[in-house]
Image: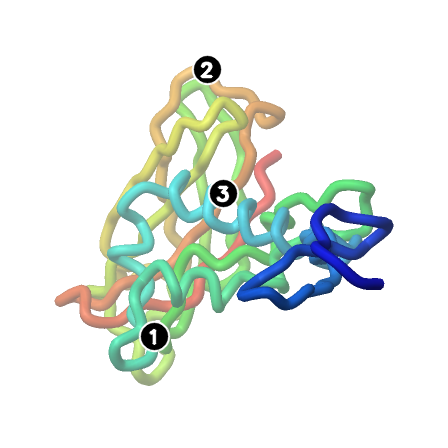
């Protein structure tokens, strides 16, 4: 192979530089690795991000148990990915029964139940007011998210009775319109919270 070279052949390029013939190989096509597991991971992360956004300012109140310099968003993601993702279907979905909308060290309310009524969603729970370390001045926060994306919140003090009820106001709501429902506790000054408790609405 002599003389001036110029052009390409197969996966080689040829050209002349400073009187010398140069042969170089063509760059291989770059491919974006998109394995099944990577696609599922990206979809799962997007689901958690959207869930975080859908709860509005609730995480600002409720994610007290997080590392120094860890943002509330990062704490929410760390608490819920991958635990709150159901990957048994063809497409990953949120498992609301495992999602945490609150995280902290306070004792959560016990054995909550919820049912719809003409006024909204009525939740009943044990206050555990006689348990050491539990304050009757703690604030109970109840929230429900509808399948249409509405977020409804109610708040009241824990109280000293053995059981208590709290109403999430939404006249005319049906159980099949509720995407998820939770209870969690804040202490009096809002500096600590409990883990959230998922409540089935009937």
- Front label number (1 vs 2): 1
Q: Which residue is mark 3?
A: 181
Secondary structure at numbered mark 2: loop
Front of the two marks 1 and 3: 1
Indicate the position of residue 43 as horizontal and vertical percent values: 63, 47
- Residue 156 showing in the rendered view: yes
Q: Are marks 1 and 3 in contact (CB under 8 Å)?
A: no
- Under tag 3, what secondary structure? strand
Q: Looking at the image, is mark 1 or mark 2 earlier in the sequence?
A: 1
Q: Looking at the rendering, in which quadrant would you find the C terminus?
A: top right
**Which mark is drawn over residue 81?**
none
Place of residue 153 in the rendered image (x, y in percent of width and height, measured from the top left): 32, 39
Read off the residue under disc 2. Answer: 172
Number of numbered labels in the structure image: 3
Q: Residue at x 19, y 70 (%)?
A: 191
Residue tagged 1? 65
Residue in view at x 31 percent, y 41 percent: 56
66 or 182: nearer the eye? 66
Horizontal placement of 191 versus 11: left or right?
left
Q: Is residue 38 left or right of residue 126?
A: right
Quadrant in the picture for residue 2: bottom right
């Amino acid at each position: 192979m002599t003389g001036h070279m110029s052009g390409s052949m197969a996966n080689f390029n040829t050209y002349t530089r400073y009187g010398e013939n140069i042969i170089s190989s063509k760059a291989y096509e770059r491919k974006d690795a998109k394995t099944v597991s990577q696609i599922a991971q990206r979809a799962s992360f997007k689901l958690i991000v959207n869930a975080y956004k859908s709860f509005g300012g609730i995480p600002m109140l409720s994610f007290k148990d997080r590392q120094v310099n860890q943002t509330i968003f990062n704490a929410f993601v760390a608490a819920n990915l991958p635990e709150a993702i159901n990957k048994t279907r063809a497409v990953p979905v949120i498992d609301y029964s495992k999602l945490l909308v609150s995280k902290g060290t306070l004792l959560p309310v016990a054995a909550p139940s919820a049912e719809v009524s003409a006024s909204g969603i009525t939740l009943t729970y044990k206050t555990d007011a006689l348990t050491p370390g539990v304050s009757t001045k703690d604030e109970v926060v109840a929230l429900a998210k509808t399948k249409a994306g509405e977020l409804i919140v109610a708040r009241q003090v824990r109280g000293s009775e053995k059981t208590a009820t709290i109403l999430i106001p939404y006249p005319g709501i049906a159980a099949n319109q509720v995407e998820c429902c939770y209870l969690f506790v804040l202490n009096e000054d809002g500096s600590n919270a409990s883990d959230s408790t998922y409540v089935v609405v009937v």
